[in-house]
Structures are given as C-alpha cells and as structure tokens.
Amino acid sequence: MTAHDPALTPRPNAAPTIYAYDEYDRAFVRERVAEFRGQVERRLAGALTEDEFRPFRLMNGLYLQLHAYMLRVAIPYGSLTSRQMRQLAYIADRWDKGYGHFTTRQNLQYNWPKLVDVPDILEALADVDMHAIQTSGNCIRNVTADHFAGVAADEIEDPRPTAEFLRQWSSAHAEFSFLPRKFKIAVSGAEHDRAAIKIHDIGLRIVRDATGETGYEVIVGGGLGRSPFVGKVLREFLPRADLLSFLEAVLRVYNRFGRRDNKYKARIKILVHETGLDEIRAQVEAEFAAMDRAPFAYDAQEFARVAASFAPPPYETLPARSQALETENAEFAAFAAVNVSPHKTSGYAIVTVSLKPIGGIPGDATSAQMRALADAADKYGFGELRVSHEQNIILPHVKQDDLLALWRDLEAAGLSTANAGLISDIISCPGLDYCSLATARSIPIAQAISERFADLERQRLIGKLGIKISGCINACGHHHIGAIGILGLEKKGVESYQITLGGDPTLTAAIGELLGPGVSAEEVPDVIESLVQFYLDERRDGEAFIDTWRRLGHKRFKESARREGEDGSGI
C-alpha cells in the first residue's frame, strides 16, 4: 500500500480544514529527502564517519538512541489529516514495529527505524506533505499551539494562522539554523492556556487591546530542563503587523549574546536570567528599531489567505444540546463527562481520545489504532485530528448526536479510556527504555501509578490532577510543571525518583517544589497514594489538587507523605 491508494483518500464528507502545502513547500521537502538519501548512502558506504554524519541526520530529525535510531516526525501545531494519520500507520507497519509515540511537542516518534530505510520513510512522509525537518538541532523547532484551536469555546482567535506564519518564517531560516541551542515557540489564542506558553523560549498569547485591535502578548525565557524558569512578559501588546520583525529581533539578540561555551547554559532562559529582563528588552527594542523591517512586513492579504485554510468546516445547524446525550449507559456517560469539551459551535463537541489506557505506555498508538482514529476523523470529524502536548489525540469537530457511536468505535479500538485530565492521564517521556540521555525509567513508573489508580470511578472522585514524569533532568516529560512531578535519576547505580508538588503549565504557571530526597521505583505509587489521600481528606468543595496544595502549603503535604514507622527521611 502507498499514499496514493484509494483507501487513503479522505471520505466525501471530509473538508480541508488545515493548511495545505503549495508547490514551493513540496519541492523543498523533496529536495531535502534527495539530499539526505545521498548522505545516508555515503554513511552506509563508510565515506562519512558517525561524527561527520551526525549533523546531517539531526537536521532531518534522526537521533541515535540506546537501541536503535529514532525518527521524530513534525506535526505542525499538532494538526494532521486522516490521510496523514493513515500514512503514519503505514510507515509504522512497513518500516518500524507497528506503533508510534506521540510526544509533548505534538510530534510523532518512531523508535526502531533502520538507517537504510530512513530515506524511504521520508519519501513516504513527503507523499502526504510531512517531514522531519527541524525536529532536532539548534534551530527553531516545530511550532506548537493550543490543540483546541479554532473550536474552543473560550477562544479569542484561532492561533493556527499565526503558527503557520511562524512555520514558514522559521523553516530553513539561514541565520537561525545554528543557534546557541534549540528554540521552541508556542501560540495560544484562548482565555485558558492549553499550550503551556509560559514554559517555552517564546510564548505568544493572542490578545486584544483597548481599541479591539488584535495582537500578541510576548513571553520570553521560559523553559524546563536542569534550570527551569517561567517565562517573563517582554511585550504586553505587540501589533500583528510587527510580529515577524519583532521575533526576528528577539532571535538576533539571542543568537548574538546566547552562550555557546556551555550547552547547559545556552538556552535563552539563561540569557534572560543572567542578563535581566529589562536589559534584554532594551536590546530587543534597539534591534527592532534599527533593523530593516521591510523583508518581514506584514501582508494582510497573505495572512487572510493562510487563515482561510483554517476556515470552519460546513457545520450543520443544531440545537445546543443533543438528546443523544441523555443516556443510561454509565460508561458512555463517564466518557462524555470526562473526555468531551465544549465547542464554540452549537450541537458540536471536542473529543479527547486518551492514549493512556490503564497500565499502557503514555503516548503510544498502534498502527491499527492510528487507522481507527483516521476512520473516526473521516466518519465523525471532517477528516481532521490534532495531537495534544499531553500526548493525546483530539477530534475537534464531532456532532453531539454522533458521540455515542464514536465512543463505541473507539471502544472497539481500545481507545475509549475515560481519563482525560485525570490522575492516570500521565505525561511521560520514553525514559531509559529508549533514550540515550535518560538516567532512569519513566514508562514503568507511569504504568505502576496508572494501575494503582485503575478504578475510573475513583479517578473521577479525585478530579483533575496532572502527573508528569521525566527520566532525566532534561525534563521531556515536563515534570517541573506537574501538579505532581516525578524525576527519575541514577544514584550510585540505583534508580531514584524525586517528587515535586505544585507545578502548573497554565497562565498561573509555576515550577513544582521538591518534596524531599528521592524514593525507589517501588515506593513511588505509595507516596502518590498518600499525597492523594491527604488531598481528598483536606480539600474543599470544587477544589482541585493544585488549589488545595496552594491553600495548605507545601509543608503540610510534605508531612502527609511520611509513612507509618518511618521518619520520612526517604521522602
């Protein structure tokens, strides 16, 4: 089967709701595939050493991990079509082990490709306007956005046109292809931040000023890793017309002054921290005032053209609430209560498909499940899907009338777990099972916690609670911003897990506070259990875990984690 098979063609009800590549994009991607094919051939023939080959493969999203190569595929702002999802499934079957891993950067990773096959994989991706460019290296990475973009009831403006503009600006940007370190940008257009904009190098929040003009709050210097920082506001309001030139100025300042002597201090968050926000702001504004802005001038007609690519699909006129939701099916009712979110269009809903089955590997989907998701998108959602930074899949355009039928289809595919946002909806990096940088396993910890809290009724009683797990200090599992964060480390040859509390990825962003010394892998579920029970005992009506932690204070939670017969020294 190839991408050109009739089976891959979206069904008649599918509508183009995402940006389509033009001939320039397609030619660029094809040229990069051909170029990398030649580089792989030279590596396999021994004409290039691994050191010589490394920068070439990283420019094409290819890592060398513990056991095999890993290919990271870009999914711009998390949006993809059913046809693209089927192609990802086809690649998983044809050249990998029949599954893919959706990441916290809204990308997809294949963990077992053979080097000789990678050019063919990239060719298959190009067939459906996809690639792996700038998913690695010290460049501007895949731009991420709110996974409810365009359909959220609390949205000010769809962030995808802005994200697409940034994708085009940053792709193969000659001046910013060798930055001091990688650079990540996220965009949100809603009242509630679902894109974690405050922990990105640049976070953009679409806002309106007193006159009603649309612009951006520009946040800079956020990031996780070994030195976590919450981003700081660089500009409270940036007119849309200045967006590209202002970001160009920010990147020029970073490229000029960011440290290159120490990779651990090379991110812009360190530059902002060491230089001070006021001085960085002065440098950026000076660069912005002095630079030739003509190449980055705002083209309202072009923005409108891009925005038109994200026009709403042909929704039906429907009542606000479907009678189909009045059901005695308790399992479906639980799914609808937990995994379904309000839609801006009457009679429609946003569905979060959890990739966190009880005891499963967070973010993993089999090729069969990818095809089931593509089928569901065609059948119920105009052929469009989203990837969330929480490692789930979103169906953004589902009629409420179709929710029960969709749930039954998802159930048949093992995708109906009603735990979105609950304690078993755990974000986790691959950890020591795959990653060459990891110092501890994270997947088994996620599985153990998930199984401890397997009772979905109890999960609903606990309510919203984000657990995030990283297998090393690089924090790909976002543990710093988990209401409960878990960091795996190696200590004298033994895996040890530090636990933090109070992290927050939203507009009230906060870095979690350390509970105490690390515990063993076997102890982690017990510690989480004691923290959750303390929360249940102490919470007030309607209070989420993070709210109770803020009200009572870290010390009270820390004391609660001490176990009978112990002095708490292990925690």
Image: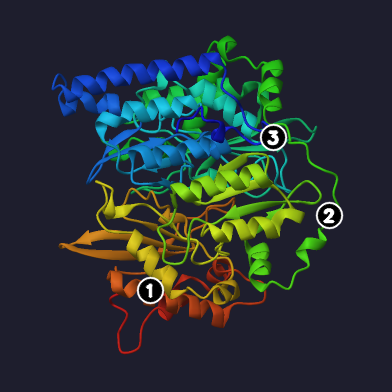
Mark drawn on residue 320: 2
Q: Earlier in the sequence, mark 1 or mark 2?
A: 2
| 458 to 477, vertically: above or below | below
Mark drawn on residue 525: 1
User: Along the line of sight, which residue is nearer the eye, 503 or 144?
Assistant: 144
Colour logic:
rainbow
Q: Amino acid at mark 1?
A: Pro
Query: For numbered disc 1, what is the local secondary structure?
Result: helix
Q: Nearer the viewer, mark 1 or mark 2?
A: 2
Question: Quadrant of the image for the N terminus?
Answer: top left
Q: Residues within 10 Å of mark 3 (few under 14, many from 20)?
A: few
Q: Position of residue 179 (x, y in %)?
A: 36, 26
How many numbered discs, if any?
A: 3
Q: Amino acid at mark 2?
A: Ala
Q: Which residue is mark 3?
A: 12
Question: Quadrant of the image for the C terminus?
Answer: bottom left
* Residue 173 visible somewhere in the drawing: no
Q: Is residue 103 left or right of residue 505?
A: left
